[in-house]
Amino acid sequence: MNTRMLSKFTLAAAVTWAAAASADGHLTQDQQRAMDARQAHMSLYAFNLGAVGAMVQDRTPYDAQVAAAAAANIAALASISQDRYWVDGTDSSIEGSRAKPEIWSDMDGYMAKNAAFAEAANNLAAVAGDGLDAMKAAFGPVGQGCGSCHESYRVPNN
């Protein structure tokens, strides 16, 4: 096999491999980084919501410092732009992703829900350190915001 033929064969094999890898659910480095970032963001939400939620549900005693810090973290997370998280090809067809394809087909709807959640998170942060009753009242819209988005845009756990 001459060098020219070998080069064409190598190029064809590389293109075939790349297409198969892409079709098989493999992510580019940028796609993986975007998916990792959004999943880390959601994990931080869960961590902080867990602290506040446990107090709201009377599973742990109310602690104004912990509540205020967790609520401030939730509000801070809600203020971070998610524009670069939602890269095409990182939906639930990829192992490890629970993002429904509807996020990409309804990005305006997703962003509207995200904005409503950010407003609720800011309201929670404003009162979380002021007592359990105030925090409970402000926590409802935060929980509703999470649930609404998950219902529309996240594949449930099996």
Image (cartoon, grey):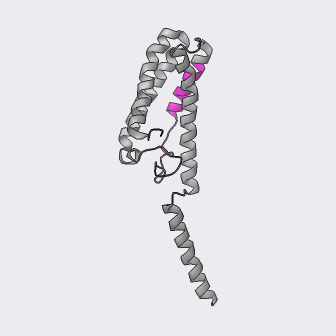
* Residue plotted at (53% across, 27% down): 74
In the image, which residues are magenta? Answer: 68-88
Image side of residue 88 versus residue 12, left or right: left
Where residue 85 appears, as percent x and y from the top left, is 51, 45
Image side of residue 101 versus residue 39, left or right: left
Where residue 8 appears, as percent x and y from the top left, is 56, 82
Where residue 36 appears, as percent x and y from the top left, is 57, 45
Q: Is residue 25 magenta?
A: no
* Residue plotted at (54% across, 22% down): 71
User: What is the quadrant of residue 156 in the picture?
Assistant: top left
Where residue 150 appears, as percent x and y from the top left, is 43, 35
Q: Is residue 86 magenta?
A: yes
* Residue plotted at (57% across, 34% down): 43
Q: In which quadrant of the rendered image does the N terminus lie? A: bottom right
Q: Is 68 drawn above or below residue 91 in the view shown? A: above
Q: Is 66 drawn above or below residue 15 in the view shown? A: above
Q: Is 92 drawn above or below residue 140 in the view shown? A: below
